[in-house]
Every structure is written in C-alpha cells, then in structure tokens.
Image: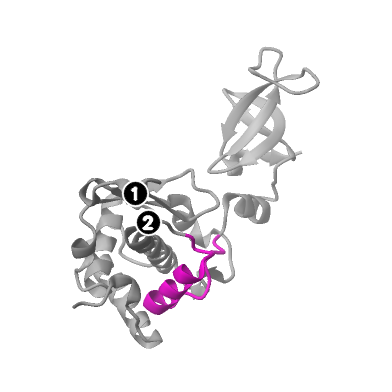
Amino acid sequence: MAEELYLIQYAPDVIVRKRAEIARRLMDLSPNIQRGTFTRLDVSDLELLFRLYNEVFFEKRFESVFSGELKFSLSSRLTRSAGKTLCPKNIARLRPETVMIEVRIGLEFFLRYHELPGDKTVSGIVTHHALEALQIVFEHELCHVLEFIYFHRSNCRGSRFKMMAYRIFGHTDSYHHLPTPNAIAREKYGLKPGDRVSFVFAERILTGIIYAINKRATVMVEDKKGSFIDRWGQRYQKYYVPVEKLRRL
C-alpha cells in the first residue's frame, strides 16, 4: 500500500533539488514567469505550480486521495497573510466529491518582493527572489490542504502540521517575513497610519490623515458633505491613494 501523502519525508538536499526543478520547469512553461522576479501572475500559474508539485513531490497521487475540487485564486486584499486555504467547516459531513478547497495567494507580496532590501524569510527559509518565496508559501498552503483532506481541520501552529511541513518541504517555521504594504510605506516612503498627508485629486490638492495602508493608502479628508462621521461629529470623505502619490506634511 502506498504511503499516505502527509507521511512523505525527504532529505534536505532532495527538497532543495526538487524545489529548484519545479522553478526551472515553471519558468519554461509559464508565459508570466521567466525569472525569479516577475511583474504578473495569473491563476493559471498557480494551477501549473500545483501540477508540478503534484508530480515532483507527490508522484501524481493527489487525485487518489482527494476527489473534490481544488481551486486556486489570487488576492490583492491579503496584506498580512501571503497565503490562505479555505475549506468548508462541515467537510467531515460532506461527500468527498462535493468538497471544494481553495488556495488563495496574496499577489502583492510577490509583485513587490524586491521593494525593500534585506533577507526575507518564509517558513524558516531565507529566500532569494519572489519565485522562491511564492513556492514556499504555496508549499505551506499545500500542507493545509493535506491536513484538511486527512483530518478535516488544519492549524499551522499545531505539532502535526509543523512535522508534516518539515518532513515534506523542510519548513522550520509557519510564518513569513515578506514586506507588507505597511512596511513598504514606512521604510520606502516614510509614511504610516496617522500621518497627515497631501495629494492631488481632480487637479486639486487635498489634505487628510492616513487611516490605513493596504494595496493603497486610505486617506480621510475633512468634508462637510462627507459620508463618514467621527465621534466628535466631524465629517470626512474617504480616498484610496497610491502611497507614492502622497506627500507627508
């Protein structure tokens, strides 16, 4: 009987070799990724990445343990987690063929990987470019998928998950240290929530306060007709502004 996928174990040098093989083949096959740094990423790239991992790490056996749908998506709204795996809470009560598990990848982490200097560690591994970081985040999410399939729940802080991630992919941690939008805004542009800024909108210079920084900065501008009211009754209008378009006052 074939070994269960979550029990697979590889030596560290084998993991490095397999990960490099997947990177080479992905760059050969993807129209968007020809090197470690890339400016575009499509769902089709994630689907291709899964097919390569299924072949190289799992000997094309994923289909034999999961008869449901494995879906992949990209999100610009993930600004803290570089990846997220979604699974029905009632998976244990569903027919296996009706289960859909979704792996969602935070797009901005990889498109903006090189905007800040220094080491960028993912799951305990120092990465050297955006593609390597994407692969390791993807591996982390595949461990979530396996844990959902076999045990119907998943927690990357749990010992079972950590052991699986280490045996299959050599991960020694469950977190990433990739540049977040807040870190890029602070270190590259000297901006943070609470700062008073100005920007140009419809040929006018507006001033306001940065409320939050995600893909863009959310700036609250005082406006008597504004839709947002603070506790003191002051009205504001909300604007979404690229950080590089802001000037700190």
Residue 23 in view (yes/no): yes
The residue furthest front is 93
Instruction: Name the foreground residue: 217 vs 71.
Output: 71
Residue kind at label 1, given as amino acid type: Ile
Residue wearing tag 2: 152
Rendered residue at 18%/78% (across/down):
1
Identify the element where label 2 is drawn.
loop
Q: Position of residue 188 (x, y in %)?
A: 64, 55
Magenta residues span 155-178
Circle 1/circle 2 CB separation < 8 Å = yes
Disc 1 target residue: 91
Q: Residues within 10 Å of mark 1 (few under 14, many from 20)?
A: some
Question: Picture quarter containing residue 203?
Answer: top right
Residue 83 x %, y %: 44, 55
Question: Along the polypeptide, which appears first: circle 1 or circle 2?
Answer: 1
**Residue at the right extreme of this rendering:** 232
